[in-house]
Image (spheres, rainbow, N blue to C red):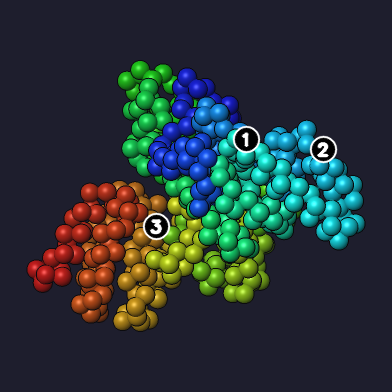
Amino acid sequence: MITQTLSVKEVTLFANRQEEMKLILTKLNAIKTKKSLFDFILTVSGIPGMGKSTLLREVEKRAIQQDLATVLVDGDELGSNRILEKIGNALFANSAPWQTALNNYQEYGAESDGLYQDTMINSFADQLKSKLKQTSVVLLIDNAQPDDNRKLLEDALIQLVNNAGLLVILASRADWRWNRFELNRRTQSISLPSFRSEDVKQINPRYGALADPVFKLTKGYPTAVVQAYQWAVDRFEATDPKLVDKFKSSEADLILELVSLVFDKQILASITDSDLHTKINRLVRIVSPLRRFDDFILYKLLPTLEPELFGQVDTLETRGYIRQMSTKTYLVRWDPTKQAYAIDKAMRSLLAQAMKHQEFDRLGTIHHMMADWYQQMTDDDPSALHNVTYFLEHLYHWAQWEHLRNPYSDIETPIQRKIEESFSKYQATQRTQFLEEFKRDDDLAELLSDGYLRLKEFVEQLIEGKG
C-alpha cells in the first residue's frame, strides 16, 4: 500500500500555492496591525485531496509565527454544532460567562426552543469581541461543509462584522454560500485548482526526471501527485539511469493504488449507506471515460452496463443519480462550455486509466457506444448549434475506441475523412467554430500526439479552400 505519512526529506508537504498564500499573507499582515477587513471571511473550496487541509495548516504556521491568536478546528471531527465550542474553549476557556452559557446550552439547549443556543452564540460573539481588543485572531475551520448546523457559526459571525483584527478561513468541498446577505458580501472565495505541469516539477526536485510522467498520470491532482512521488521514492533510486522507464513499466500498479487511496478511501469514505456507496461507486466509474454527460446519456448507458443495479431506469431517475454524484462526491459539476455535466478532469483521467487495466472490455464498450451515439446525433441535424460539440465528442470517443482495439492503427486518415464529410454539411460559421474548439481540445491533442498538429493544419486548409 502507499505510505500515507510522507517523508519531509523526500516530498514537499506544502508547495505550489503561491497565489493563494500571497492573498492570505496580505490579510494576515493587515489584521496584525488591527485593520478591519471588509472581506474578513475566506472560503477555500476543492474536491477531497486538492490540498485544502494542507493550505490551512500552512496558514496556521504562518499566523503563529506572526504571534496571532490562531485556532484550527476540523468540522468532520467535531460536527458543525461543536465548532463554536472548540474555538471558544481555545480562546477564552477561563471566561465564566462563556462557560456558563456553554454548559447551559449543552445541558438544556435541545429543550429550550433556541433560548440557550442564542445565549451561547451571543456569549461567543461578546467574548471574541473582547479578545479582539487585546490581540488579532485567526479562525481556521477545516471541513466546514454547509449543513443544517451552519446557523450557529453564521449567527456568531454576523455579530463580528467590522471588528478589527479578525480573519476567518473556511475550507469546504463545495462552494460556500451563507444564508445572510451581509456575510456573503464579506466573503471572498478561493477555488483550489490542480497543479500545473511546472508546479509538479517543484514537488520533489530529486526525482525531477519523473515530473512529466507524474503529471501525465495524475493531471496535477495534488494528493495523487504527492503519493505518486512517494511511491517512486519507496521503490527506486533517484540516480537510477532507468528511473523513468522503471516508473512507466509499473504505472498500472500505481494507478490502482492511487484509485484505492484517493477515490475509495477519501472521496467515497463519507458515504456510509452501503447500497448508495455501491451505486455512486459504479456511477462515477461509468462516467469517468466521458468528457460530458447528461441524464439522457446515463439513461442510454446504465441498463446496458449495469443491468443488475440500473436495469429499469428512466431519465428522471438518472437526473437524480447525477445530483447524488454531485452532492456525495463533489466530483460532478455543470460545465457551461459543454452544456452538460462533467466529472473533475484529474479524477476522470485516473479512473479511466484504472478501468483500462481492470475493465478493458467495458471501457471499449463505453467509447464505442458513445461514438455511435454522437455520430447519430450529428447525422440527424447537421445544422444544429450543438452539432460541432457533438462531432468533436464523436471523434474523441471513436479515436479512444480505435486505440483500444489497435494502439498502432492509423486513425489520422479516417479522422480527416470524417472532418471532410462533416464540413460538406457545415455552414462557414460551423467550420470556424470547429477549428476554434479543436484548437482548444487538450484531450484530443494528447490522444492524437503529432497527428493533432497535422489535423489542425488540415482543418485550416479546408477552411481556406486548399483542401
In this view of the protein, can residue 326 be seen by the observer?
A: no
Are the residues at dot 3 and dot 2 in contact (C-beta closer than 8 Å)?
no
Q: Left or right: where does residue 220 sit relative to residue 146?
A: left
Please provide percent x and percent y for residue 350.
48, 46
Q: How busy is the neighbourhood of tag 3: few (under 14 within 10 Å), some, or many (20 plus)?
A: many
Please provide percent x and percent y for residue 365.
48, 59
Q: CA distance from mark 3 to mark 2?
A: 69 Å
Amino acid type shown at disc 2: Ala
Circle 1 sits on which residue? 134
Are the residues at dot 2 and dot 1 in contact (C-beta closer than 8 Å)?
no
Amino acid type shown at disc 3: Trp
Circle 2 sits on which residue? 96
Residue 401 numbered tag: 3
In this view of the protein, which residue sits in the foreground, 417 or 341? 341
Q: CA distance from mark 2 to mark 1?
A: 18 Å
Q: How busy is the neighbourhood of tag 1: few (under 14 within 10 Å), some, or many (20 plus)?
A: few
